[in-house]
Image: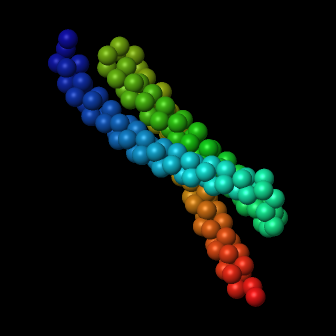
Amino acid sequence: MSLAAQLAHPTVIGAMLAPALLMAATGSLLISANARLSRVVDRLRSLVVSWEHDAPDRAVRDAQITEHRRRAALVLSACRMLYVALACFIGTSLALAGNTLFFVQLGVVATTLAVVGMAALFGASVAMGREVSLAVKSFDKELDQELARRTKP
């Protein structure tokens, strides 16, 4: 093995660290997104139970169910994009390793995967931001409705 090839290995390992850090960050976001999805699903289940008992404020419950379904769809979309990002970052790391180990030029593949991964990460962040905004609006509405209910004579 030539000296240049031997020196390339630490460089490749160093280059593989960036996708590894992005994988760790994406994993953290996935944990957060899955927890949010779980909370939305639990809230939907409780609303469905109220709905089945034909609560007097059925129209309000129907609106809440619609809002929570929209939230669940956003979180699910974010989770999908995060999984795509994770796969792209893993692919980036493997392509960088393939450059050195197999002497195959995969630089364009690595760069393309990294860009697609970052775009998916960006899209997931936007979706999660929208979901958080909907969550706060929904909570505000629920509080307003409860306050109005309690102040009625």
Residue 70 versus residue 43: which sits nearer the camera? 43
Residue 122 versus residue 10: which sits nearer the camera? 122
Measuring from the top left, give residue 123's x and y in whole percent. Answer: 58, 48
Measuring from the top left, give residue 139's x and y in whole percent. Answer: 62, 68
Quadrant housing residue 142: bottom right
* Coloring applied to the structure: rainbow
Q: Is residue 50 left or right of residue 8?
A: right
Residue at 70% in and 56% down: 47
The furthest residue to the bottom: 153
From the viewer's perspective, is residue 73 above or below residue 8?
A: below
From the viewer's perspective, is residue 106 above or below residue 145?
A: above
Measuring from the top left, give residue 141's x and y in whole percent. Answer: 68, 72
Residue at 24% in and 24% down: 9
Q: Is residue 32 left or right of residue 55?
A: left
- Quadrant of the rendering where the N terminus is positioned: top left
Measuring from the top left, give residue 126's x and y in whole percent. Answer: 58, 54
Is residue 134 among the parts visible in the rendering?
A: yes
Residue at 40% in and 16% down: 104
Residue 139 versus residue 112: which sits nearer the camera? 139
